[in-house]
Amino acid sequence: MITAHGSNGNALFNQGNIIFTLTADTGLQPPYHVVVIKGTETVYDETVQGNVSGVTTVEVDNLAPGKYHYEITDVNDVIAKASFSIWIAPLVFLHGTVTPGAYPVSVSFEIGLTIDYGLTIPAVQGTIPAGQTAIPVSASLGSGVPEDPQHNLLPDTEYHYRMLMVNSMGSTPTPDSTFHTAPLAIPQGTLLPATGDIV
């Protein structure tokens, strides 16, 4: 059996990875040859001796954004071939405080490119019990997961958002606010004088 999963990057790291798990007791026979290709460039090409009676894990990290293909062979034949993508998305944390009052309240954040919003993210705190104390609430989005594109954020883009509080008596939104996501990280460098056998 073979499984592959990865962690897509975000603006904090600007890279991602993929992890292959190969289980020998399902008919696979190590050693395994693992190749990962981006376009025409081979970014990983290794033979892994593997565990002849159990699980072998192969991690390929420091992958830049883009589409990749991989191929894995054991001693007999090609046993896996597929493609995957590394996405880089801005990561944003939303915060607020809620004073519930006489009834428990559920809290969410609405977000979108306009004041029509379009996406609702529940606060991680869940339902807030009744009370007169201001309770901090939060949510995050921008995971960069290709299978969940609605939670991805565009770089260098203005978003509208607000907090929505709902209890058994009705709902109350906060006023609209905005934030602007950062542009994709661009490498920076400084050229230093050359050294060695030079004139």
Image (cartoon, helix red, strand yellow):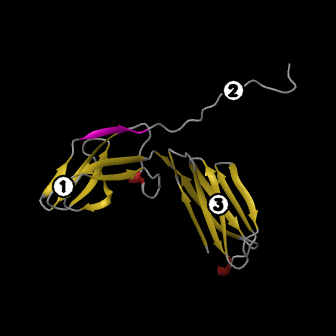
Provide the residue span drawn in magenta: 176-181
Mark identifier at residue 191: 2
Query: Which numbered disc flags the more N-terminal residue, 2 or 3?
Result: 3
**Three-letter code, disc 1:** Gln
Say whether residue 178 is magenta.
yes
**Three-letter code, disc 2:** Leu
User: Is 51 rendered above or below residue 198?
Assistant: below
Report the side of 22 relative to 108 (left or right).
right
Distance between the alpha carbons at the discs numbered 1 and 2: 59 Å
Distance between the alpha carbons at the discs numbered 3 and 1: 50 Å
CB contact under 8 Å: marks 2 and 3:
no
Query: Which SS does the magenta portion mostly show?
Result: strand
**Residue at (30% x, 61% y) in the render:** 126
Task: Report the residue marked by disc 3.
Answer: 59
Q: Nearer the viewer, mark 3 or mark 1?
A: 1
Report the side of 92 relative to 27 (left or right).
left
**Residue at (13% x, 57% y) in the render:** 170
Q: Secondary structure at mark 1?
A: loop
